[in-house]
Image (cartoon, rainbow, N blue to C red):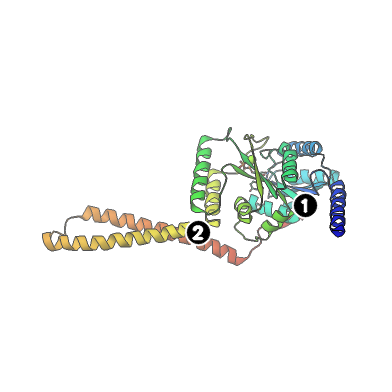
Amino acid sequence: MRNNIAQKNTAMAEAASDSARVPPYGGMFSAIVPCRDEREALPIFYAEFLRAMESAGAENFEIIFVEDGSKDETLEYLRELAAKDSRVKYISFSRNFGKEAAMYAGLRAARGDIAAIMDADLQDPPFLLPQMFREMREGGYDSVATRRRTRRGESPARSFCARAFYRVLNSLSSLKFVEGARDFRLINRKVIDAVLEMPEYNRFIKGMYEWVGFKTKWIEFDNMERCAGKTKWSFAGLAMYSLDALTSFSTIPLVVAAAIGIFFCLLSSVAIVLLSIRQLIYRNSAYGWTSMICVIFFLSGMQLFCLGVIGHYMSKLYLESKRRPSYIIKEKN
Ligand code: UDP
Ligand code: MG
């Protein structure tokens, strides 16, 4: 009995000294910022970020900028910033490797107990961070995720395609993808390490967050327009990214291809029986050239489509099997 009370007391004392030692948001925080051609947006981001840290009462943090093959003066600016502020770290890639590679590099470099990936253009608003720290601490969450409530300021065609993409992705994957979800999430060390356990070449971080699980709190915000500069995503680029995301987190397209095959096999066995009977009765097989051509076109199209689906998975397998690194670092501090 006494032993129990003593144990409880020690635990409480430990908890008290813990909360005195740990800054209000819990340990060291790493912000990871992928940037490609963000020279204009970076000073604005840096100022806003520091303001958010101040209002959260956070002192123990680092900002890891991952410069992803920029053509403007982004790297020069980061060098200057790092010389002035020791909390600024930067990693510069030898060429453009894409945002997914940049996020991976940032997570690997992060030394924090908690981390968040943020866009440099303020579309992942730093002012949400104090609330995210609070939610994580008070709700005991492993991850605090954000989603855009609206897509205001985005082109209607892009919004439509994004919505359609989420619908298809959700119907094809056993994981649940939240529409409008951002890569911007506050995650603790458990989640960071879980994501880093996935060294795959074809990366889709939103899927990885879902795949690793953990207790997640969602918060919503209204879409923010880019603070400066231009979007780095072309329509074709987004379409390819969507296709990769789809095949990274679902093998159902392969099942669909097989199902189409089975369906046409069954259909053709019925057709063989019916057409043979018709031929025996009417003996007029010369008719039906048009319909035959239509069927041939349709079926060859289907076959090529299914081959394409299989080919896409094979190409990913091929890329994975080469075991190439996701990125190459040219310079860092
Ligand atoms: N980005 C990157 N590499 C790329 C493309 C984008 O590091 O190849 C960064 C970019 O600098 C920004 C973030 O990823 O910080 C999101 O990009 P962007 O704002 O262009 O995308 P959008 O918000 O339009 O989807
Ligand atoms: Mg953006």
Q: Nearer the viewer, mark 1 or mark 2?
A: 1
Q: Nearer the viewer, residue 301 or 282?
A: 282
**Mark 1 vs 2, N-terminal side:** 1
Image quarter of the N terminus: bottom right
In the displayed orientation, state which residue is furthest to the front: 1
Residue at left 72%, top 56%? 190
Crowd around label 1: few <14 · some 14–19 · many ≥20 (10 Å)? some
Circle 1 residue: 113
Residue at left 33%, top 59%? 264
For the image, the number of numbered tags is: 2
Residue 45, above or below 94: above
Q: Which mark is residue 39?
A: none
**Is residue 311 shown left or right of residue 74?**
left
Residue 72, above or below 207: above
**Is residue 6 shown left or right of residue 46?**
right
Crowd around label 2: few <14 · some 14–19 · many ≥20 (10 Å)? some
Residue type, label 1:
Asp
Q: Nearer the viewer, residue 87 or 9?
A: 9
**Is residue 207 shown left or right of residue 42?**
left
- Report whether the residue tagged 1 is closer than 8 Å to ligand 1: no
Circle 2 residue: 251
Residue type, label 2:
Thr
x and y percentages locating residue 218 in the rendered image:
64, 43
x and y percentages locating residue 299 in the rendered image:
33, 57
Q: Quadrant of ligand 2?
A: top right
Please, what secondary structure does the residue beneath circle 2 have? Answer: loop
In 3D space, how far apart are the residues under numbered discs 1 and 2 (Cα atoms)?
34 Å
